[in-house]
Amino acid sequence: MTRYPRDMIGYGPRIPDAQWPGGAKVAVQFVLNYEEGSENCVLHGDAASEAFLSDIPGAAMWPGQRHWNMESIYEYGARAGFWRLHRLFTGANIPVTIYGVASALARSPEQVAAMQDAGWEIASHGLKWVEHKDMPEEEERAAIAEAIRLHTEVTGAAPRGWYTGRCSENTVRLVAETGTFDYISDTYDDDLPYWREYGDRDQLIIPYTLEANDMRFATAPGWVTGEHFGSYLKDAFDTLYAEGQEGSPKMMSIGLHCRLIGRPGKIAALKRFIDYIQGFDDVWCPTRLEIAEHWASTHPHQRRERPSQMSKADFVAKFGGIFEHSAWIAEGAHDLELGPAHDTAAGLHNALSRVFRSASEDKRLGVLTAHPDLAGKLAAAGRLTAESSSEQAGAGLDMLTDAERETFARLNTEYVEKHGFPFIIAVRDHDKASILAAFDRRINNDRETEFAEACRQVERIAAFRLKDLLP
């Protein structure tokens, strides 16, 4: 059994109403990453200097050496950039979420006090601002525990949100397994929060952003001037606001760094953007923790049975009748590379249909002949499957006059004699009159045309049946 763990469907077309407080059309959330004093540096016990997210083009790590210029750029963020941003956001009365690296917070007590005095949320940004991709699982688990411990010691409270950034494939699972975080943000895959299941833990995920992010001042392709960044933010906001007006409120995350946007030539565009959104009455500017609390109360997680996680026996028992009396199709589908995308009606229908379509003509003919005649003898004897009985009743085929019943019987006989399988139609698309019209029209098709049409109708029937069981 092959299972594909990546979630390629998310909410799909079933986007929930965020119900932001005050009927806000969009939630605009500002994150300020505080990493200064936690970056790679031999003073911190690291093997080399930092090379990531600075104004030094093409920066490279210097093994065994301090990089004085790099260190001074990070120091600018703590010494000047942070305070410029602090004045901007407190002046605008907008609370921010700090992604605080624990070791950086420990080296910046005055900044921490200013964050707390402003009422900002201080979420955890890990223990050190370093790469985690090659970190052994036990080492990363220990680093997470130490980040929580040090964060709590420095700020006086345990972090309730988490974002690593330079994470490994294990990070989100390891953080969720602590069972202590209201949300985790190490994803970039949606415009709304959502839930993930890790064992018994229902973990809220609040996706972050790498595009509405000032890090692109230090990457290519990226922002050249503050105006580029500000223009992008405005376009993103306008699009999301319009979606909110259409009844689909979303979330906009904006990522900032003290040493980047804190420069005077860059921050002016951020200020203009803040002035712009404050011209709207129906925009909510919360912390990420406020979003988490709102989502948990408004959209609590509800676990459900997921086809991709079912045993083969349970899977076949539940879906073996989707294609009439043809459990072999469900058996084949269970052996495919299923994943979260197949836990919906449309997704599972695709998997089942793949097995049906790739079968030999004789196998597909067996599926066709497994279908009962419309309003035929099995229906009269009450021997239809529950699905077929309900479908035929929904089209009124259980309430025929004697003349109508005789017409159906005659057409059924003529059709089977000509094509070698029963007339099949997705009756939920029709009423008695349109079914009879289709009967009259299709009975004159050649067998090849009608075989193909009957197969399409079988798949259509399966789609309806799955919609009764899955979202």
Image (cartoon, grey):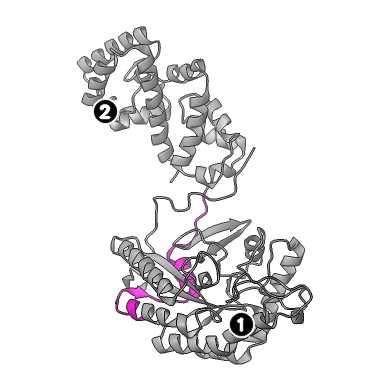
Looking at the image, is mark 2 or mark 1 earlier in the sequence? 1
Q: Is residue 75 left or right of residue 47?
A: left
Q: Which element is circle 2 on?
A: loop
| 41 up-or-down from 187: above or below | below
Q: Is residue 162 visible?
A: yes
**Residue 76 placed where, x, y %?**
59, 86
Residue closer to the observer: 201 or 444: 444
Magenta stretch contains residue 292? yes
Q: Nearer the viewer, residue 125 or 43?
A: 43
Label 1 belongs to which residue? 73
Q: Residue at x 37, y 26 (%)?
A: 457
The percent coordinates of residue 9 (x first, y second) are: 48, 49
Residue placed furthest toward the top? 417
Q: Quadrant of residue 311?
A: top right
Estimate the spatial distance between the alpha carbons at disc 2 and disc 1, rounded to whole Å.
Answer: 76 Å
In the image, what residue type sits under mark 2?
Gly
Give the image quarter of residue 279. Answer: bottom left
Rendering coords of residue 329 (x, y %) = 53, 28
Q: Residue at x 53, y 86 (%)?
A: 81
Residue located farthest toward the front when viewing the structure as drawn:
57
Q: Which residues are magenta?
A: 275-304
- The residue at which mark 2 appears reads as 396
Give the residue displayed 59% in from the left and 76% down from the top: 54
Vertical side of 377 occupied by 185: above or below: below
Mark 1, secondary structure of its residue = helix
Depth check: give the residue in front, 432 or 192.
Answer: 192
Q: Is residue 303 left or right of residue 378?
A: right
Answer whether residue 40 is magenta in the image: no
Q: Is residue 95 visible?
A: no
Q: Residues within 10 Å of mark 2 (few under 14, many from 20)?
A: some
Q: Position of residue 313 (x, y in %)?
A: 61, 34
